Image (cartoon, helix red, strand yellow):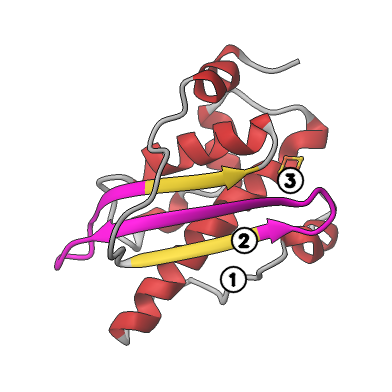
């Protein structure tokens, strides 16, 4: 039921770990399934994401989406990183089963939370970035995932 890419990223997740003194860090969870994801960014003076790491306490799809999401944001500016939506992550993984779509939402929201933290620390506004939620369950229901 999982694509080969999902299995590959689950078995060999990229960017696992933490960053010391991250430029931004974001943690989100889903109260319903109990899964938690934390993403760390190292962002340079030009606003480019130089490095990204993650720690995910969650299901296999959450691990695979964290892995892919961190791969996709590396080298992007903070503004471009907003294009790494849950749909973009799912596409890059050749899809997820419908019951696992919410796992990719965790990745999108963790990216937003880390960007939000970076923006707060630096007193900047990232256009189009909304204040992230800590528990994506509300959002998942709103969007009927
Ligand atoms: Fe909750 Fe995957 S089952 S993140």
Mark number displayed over residue 102: 3
Q: Quadrant of the N terminus?
A: top right
State the CA–CA distance, disc 1 to disc 3: 15 Å
Ligand 1 within 8 Å, label 3 CB: yes
Verify CB contact (< 8 Å) between mark 1 and mark 2.
Answer: yes
- Give the numbered dot on residue 132: 1
Question: Whole-percent x and y of residue 137?
Answer: 79, 60
Residue at (81%, 48%) from the top-left corner?
33
- Mark 2 lies on residue: 28
* Label 3 secondary element: helix
Camera-near label (2 vs 3) is 2
Q: Of the residues tagged 1 and 2, which is closer to the observer?
A: 2
First-in-chain label (1 vs 3): 3
Residue 92 colored in magenta in the image: no
Residue 48 picture location, percent across and down? 22, 57
Q: Percent position (x, y) of residue 18? A: 38, 50
Circle 2 SS class: strand
Name the residue rendered at 48%, 71% in the picture.
Answer: 128
Local secondary structure at mark 1: loop
Left or right for 76, reference 11: left
In the displayed orientation, state which residue is furthest to the left: 45
**Sequence-earlier tag: 2 or 3:** 2
Magenta-tinted stretch: 29-52
Numbered tag placed on residue 23 in the rendering: none
**Neighbour class for label 1 at 10 Å: few (<14), some, many (≥20)?**
many
Separation of residues labelled 1 and 2 (CA atoms): 9 Å
């Amino acid at each position: 039921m999982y694509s080969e890419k999902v299995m590959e990223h689950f078995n060999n997740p990229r960017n696992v770990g933490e960053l010391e003194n991250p430029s931004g860090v974001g943690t989100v969870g889903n109260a319903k399934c109990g899964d938690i994801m934390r993403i760390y960014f190292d962002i340079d003076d030009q606003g480019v994401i130089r490095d990204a790491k993650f720690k995910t306490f969650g299901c296999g799809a959450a691990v695979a989406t964290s892995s892919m999401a961190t791969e996709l944001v590396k080298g992007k500016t903070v503004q471009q990183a907003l294009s790494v939506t849950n749909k973009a992550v799912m596409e890059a993984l050749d899809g997820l089963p419908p019951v696992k779509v919410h796992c990719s939402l965790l990745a999108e929201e963790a990216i937003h939370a880390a960007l939000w933290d970076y923006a707060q620390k630096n007193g900047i506004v990232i256009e189009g970035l909304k204040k992230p939620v800590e528990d994506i369950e509300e959002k998942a229901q709103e969007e009927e995932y």
